[in-house]
Image (spheres, coloured by chain):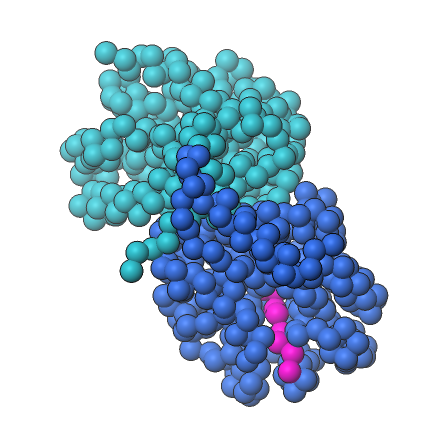
Amino acid sequence: MTPVDLHLGLPTSRELKSYRVWDSYFTPSHSHPGPNGGDRLIAEIERSLPAIGKGHFEKLCYFPHVGIGTTSDPAFEKAARDNPELILRPLKRWPQMLLGMIQLNANDVRASLDALNRWLRDGPMLGVYFPGGGPGALTCTHQNFELLVKRIGELKGVIMQHTWFKTGGKQGPGESTPAELAKLGARFPEQNFICAHAGGEWQRGIRAVRTSPNILVETSGFDATAGFVEMAVRELGSHRIIFGSHLPSRSLGTELSKITTANISAGDKKLILGKNYRTLLHPILKTKKP
Amino acid sequence: MMNRRELLQGGVATILTAGVVGGAAKEVPQFDITDTNLSLFQWPFRRLPLDDTTLLIKKMRTLGITRGWAGSLEAILHRDIVSVNGRLAGMCAKYPELTPIGSVNPTLPDWQGDLFRCLKKHKMPGIRVHPGYHGYTLADQSFTQMLEQATKAGLFVQIAVTMEDPRTQHSRLRAPDVDLAPLPGLMRDHPGARVQLLNLRPRGVQIDSLAKIPGVYLDTARVEGTDGVPTLLGKMPRGRVLFGTHAPVLIPEAALIRTHESNRLDEKPLRSLLAGNAQALLKA
């Protein structure tokens, strides 16, 4: 039997295509790429393809581990350092669809600076992801961020910082809140930062970055709570909001509907679903052109 | 106001519209849709875009949701449950697609009276409980007695396992997810009981455990992952997963899209999920 090709709850294909969706937060096999340095990562990208097709996504950005201690697997870390082809595997298979930003380990500044040169300056990556958990996590107000953010800025890289405001407090020592990202952002007013998940508890998260014009919020990673995007547009403006899918561990339904169903203009939706992200990426994309 | 026939016809038209892809009409199956996890009125912690029932109904009709089992968000904190259920029944009477699901709080004196009114006065097919906000566990004697009486009366019981991710709850009003550990014993002691768990985000081993308990049903409102819904359907016995949105707290389109985004469900299981299983539960 053929699975039913439905569009219940989705805008029309024509409308979706008009949004030119660029996904800033694609998380296949996010904490470890799996056996053989990437088999699970490839499988999870394949698992996401039906939803990517239904959403008419143009591009998705994922966050590879590059062997600088962001996983707890020494064998993988060594393999990633010794064989960069492992890291490039998804980009080579889906060159038109995928973008990449490396996961940085702020606990190891030396290795992270080397990785920036290798993967942003000399390689295909467009920015960095600072994780909120795992061995690479470090609260973003730590002094180790100074050198890293400065170098990322020199390379015109984009910064995605994982953030959550959790009721009851942090669940890990390396987590960052939007308020902490606002402090970091104030020290680097010329650098843009993406506040991943808008802090999860977005009513506080949006307020925490409201007066930080160089901080944009990313929309994934929490339930499809009604009213989020409307508040974000009201308080930040649609030019400071960036769509993320969190596929495949979260769903197209949860993440895309936050924007497509919001009571905002079609122009605002276009900004959030792709244009803002393209604007952020533009400086570093220019450096990659042959 | 539309009658049920007009409403159903409207739903069909909506579904045909939903099949318009790139401007060209595309044949898609027509689906009846029952949302088993709706709520009316205001969420205590912020205003929601669809917390006006008129707007919620308009949205349901746009999406082709032809029936909705509606509880009351007032029941979370109010203790005058008689008036809560009265307002709910009154509002549902205005809209043919709504079926009221009254709330009962077994920690309140004479909760039996509330149960009786749900059954006799409002003719409700089931009740909804909020152990997380009302401060009891499924092992408490009051809940056991309530389940027993509801089952004897032919009512199903919806347990709101959570109403909001614990990580985002108000710091002064935290309600942990309901502990389901007593459920196997409870269901064994009450054969014939029908219990639907709302807003559960089931995980691997838990799904296996729930699958073994007869009479336990789930909804899809917080089932995550791009293929989470078909995976859940594959693990639960047939007929035990019902479509639910948790609107207006959550965006209803989210749950709808999740039923088909991975292209893994054929028409028959999709029909069962979207409406058939709910109708079967009502008749069980």
How many numbered discs?
0
Give the vertical position of A81 relative to A9 (above or below): above
Give the vertical position of B89 relative to A264 (above or below): below
Residue B143 in the image, given as x and y percentages of width and height:
66, 78
Q: Is residue B134 visible?
A: yes
Q: Nearer the viewer, residue A284 or B240?
A: B240
Q: Is residue A169 visible?
A: no
Q: Nearer the viewer, residue A153 or A230?
A: A230
Residue occupying image coordinates x 42% and y 68%: B207
Residue A130 is left or right of residue B69, and the answer is left
Residue occupying image coordinates x 40% and y 48%: B27
Residue A260 is left or right of residue B109, and the answer is left
Residue B184 in the image, given as x and y percentages of width and height:
50, 80
Residue B175 is left or right of residue A256, and the answer is right
Residue A187 in the image, given as x and y percentages of width and height:
54, 18
Give the vertical position of A155 relative to A90 (above or below): above
Quadrant location, the C terminus of chain B: bottom right
Rendered cyan, the chain in question is A
**B163 in the magenta segment:** yes
Q: Which residues are magenta?
A: B154-164
Rendered blue, the chain in question is B
Quadrant location, the N terminus of chain B: bottom right
**A223 in the magenta segment:** no
